[in-house]
Image (tube, helix red, strand yellow):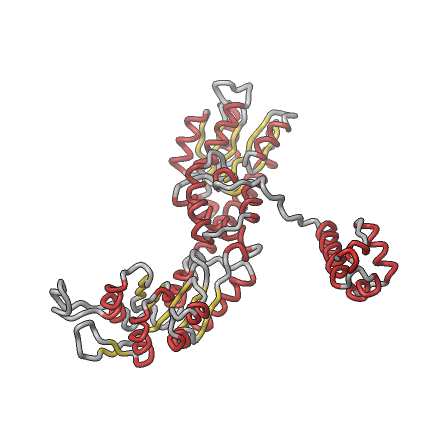
Amino acid sequence: MAESVRKLLIVEDDPGLQKQLKWCFEDYDVCTAENRQAAIAELRRHEPAVILQDLGLPPQPEGVEEGFATLTETLRLAPHTKVIVVTGNGDQENALTAVAQGAYDFYEKPVDTDTLKLLVDRAFNIYELEAENRRLHNQVADSPLDGIVAASDGMLAVCRMIEKIAPTDVTTLLLGESGTGKELLARALHRLSSREDGNFVAINCAAIPENLLESELFGYEKGAFTGAHKQTVGKVEVANGGTLFLDEIGDMPMALQAKMLRFLQERVIERVGGRKEIPVDVRVVCATNQNPENLIAEGLFREDLFYRVSEITINIPPYREREEGRLILARTLLQRFAKLQNSAINGFSDDAMQAIETYSWPGNVRELENKIKGAVIMADGKMVTAADLGLDGSDAEGESLNLREVRQVAESKAIRVALTRSYGNISKAAELLGITRPTLYDLLNKYGLSADSYSKKAAS
């Protein structure tokens, strides 16, 4: 943002001070307002990056209620705007309250123009840096891995595999629970490949009745069955030159699996009711939320088809196992849905973060998306709470990050395991722990443990 177009809004009801401030910031594009209604109108019209606002505004210029109301409405409409509140001399308590409610900074009267100019200039610099950061973040979000937030080790490994195999035509099997993002990864494989200009065709093998799935995949000739009034091309042909994504392939009927195996081996198909072999050039990506080995053992899935579709297998970790990536993904989704709803929500409360970390998330990322989307609509404040998410943030205590507490928990657990394995034998337990007997006795006293309770006699 060039300095010549920096827009500054001054909200001040004193005409003399307003004129002085306007003269002080003549290098900026300045607009002024004397009350909340005028300030909000100027905010909507000019979208200033920085606002210099007096806390004492009419109709009660001696109080601060109207000033706080103006600040709240401003940040709700333009959460990225930097608001510097101007307070009376010695009124530091209200100034700190304003900052706690989202103001960028505060300044106490009387006005020193040089100091104030420095403060405003710094606010513009911070605003511009944040705007550039958002722009770069959006560029990353538009990448072929759009929508995939990889902050945990497991998801980083998945993304590295996607990037490695995408340029090849290797048939890929994506394994993961429902809602873990299998189709998202399949689309990333397509966009990162040389086939990105071709079609990406997805078909859910579990959603189509068995008697229709074959014609959906391979198409049919006119007159092949009752109602077949014209020749129809199937999904495989539509994907020619692109990528075919077979979701929930574990639910594919056994009768169709043999035809799918021939297609994968020969890369030719025959339409239902047809006799002509049609060659197709298509990359195949499959996915299932079931265990293929169990399906094979139960006779529900052909072993030879499994080896054909799993030239490369990628295991996608469930959301609950993504460790530190859980909150990062949740915050990314919150930003996305808040932007779509034009909401000023900008974060999670402490109980919401604790609930996200402790909830088991049986529906994985899909469940998370639904809960956050609903929370953005239902939330009353600027922060999403556990109640907004429909979760109970008080059921489980958050995991401690205090290193001393973490060390003590791990230490006492290791001692109990060692005593269990050694049946309370101090010498053996100390050897397992890599410490001396006296040290182990000290630790037993520290944690209130008794070796006798782990002995064979106690076990019997």
Position of 403 relative to 101 (above/below): below
Residue 442 visible to an observer of this rendering: yes
Residue 28 visible to an observer of this rendering: no
Of the 4 image quadrants, the one containing the C terminus is: bottom right
Residue at 15% across, 67% down: 225
Horizontal and vertical percent position of residue 172:
41, 71
The furthest residue to the right: 438
Horizontal and vertical percent position of residue 196:
34, 68
Position of 280 relative to 53 (above/below): below
On the rendered structure, is 261 left or right of 325?
A: left
The quadrant holding residue 286 is bottom left
Horizontal and vertical percent position of residue 339:
41, 45
Horizontal and vertical percent position of residue 354:
58, 45
| Foreground pick, 409 / 116 | 409
On the rendered structure, is 395 left or right of 404?
A: left
| Foreground pick, 181 / 121 | 181
The furthest residue to the bottom: 266
Residue at 48% across, 29% down: 70
| Foreground pick, 282 / 72 | 282
